[in-house]
Image: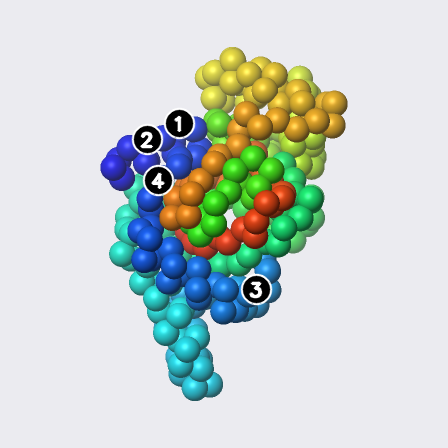
Amino acid sequence: MKNEIILELEKFGIVKVKNFLNFEEVNQIKNILKFYSAPKGHHKSYYSTKLIHFFSKLIKLDFRKFKNDYIIYQLAKKKGLNFISNSFFKRKSFLKFIDGYHSPVSNKDVLPWHTDQAYQGDERKQSGFVNPDHAHLKFFIYLSKVGPNNGCMSYIPESHKIGYAIRKGIFENEIEYEPYFTLEEFRNFLSRKKNRIYIENYLNDYDLVENFLNKTKFIEKNEESEEFDYSLLPGDAIIFNEGGIHKGSKSLLNERFVLRYLYSIKKN
């Protein structure tokens, strides 16, 4: 099963795993997240990943947080997330953070189309662009039902390959930097003749960019597409290379509860 996960990740950049958690595990983790009732990015949404984090909970006599953090940390070991991550990167990887949060019912996307690993223009002024191989692998474990227009993950298959080629080209000064964080910026970047030639030659694939541009034409008309949406039940998971183009859709029907683990080959 884990080998199949790795093969699908390499090819498409994303894989859906049904019944990643059983019924009891879903209820246990969801109750923990509900207790803190934290939105994305809030300090209460983060869980311990290092001994010093756990030790600080004991110093503060926060035994409940210590126990909850330990349950969530141990879940990663129980499910073999580090093994999957090491196999994906083909080298030792590290758990960078864990968070769990809820998104309320809303008519706004959790996050619009984007790529998480896009370089920022001021990076080079500081210390140079980050090595493109210092990538991240994310595990999204859903604790509530999600689907189109109801909190689902949407992902353009194989876009992670294009995203990596862009980072590689910029990092090695083969192509010039310009913003490519949003889907619109990403498509504009690919429309530059020099950029496209480099990416197609690097990938040794002369159809991938064209197929991507055709699949994402909906953005030109300010429209949306459900073609790339994933429907999941509580306990299902998505593992994905965050260098691909993806988004979190609006939650129109119910709150969205998700537990996330992020792995990288670069230490914190």
Q: What's under tag 3, amino acid-wise?
A: Ala
Q: Is residue 114 above or below residue 59?
A: above
Q: Which of these two is toward me, 69 or 136?
A: 69
Looking at marks 4 and 3 on the same chain, the residue that comes earlier in the sequence is marked by 4
Task: Answer with the quarter of the image where residue 185 lies.
Answer: top right
Q: Is residue 100 above or below residue 113?
A: below
Q: Which residue is mark 2?
A: 7
Q: Which residue is mark 1?
A: 11
Question: Can you tell which of label 4 and label 2 is closer to the viewer?
Answer: 4
Residue sitting at 44 percent across and 52 percent down?
Answer: 143
Q: Which residue is mark 3?
A: 38
Q: Which residue is mark 4?
A: 18
Disc 4 crowd, CA 10 A, few/some/many (<14, 14-19, 20+): some
Cα separation, mark 4 vs mark 2, equals: 17 Å
Question: Can you tell which of label 2 and label 3 is closer to the viewer?
Answer: 3
Cα separation, mark 2 vs mark 1, equals: 6 Å
Instruction: Indicate the position of residue 180 as horizontal and vertical percent values.
Output: 66, 35
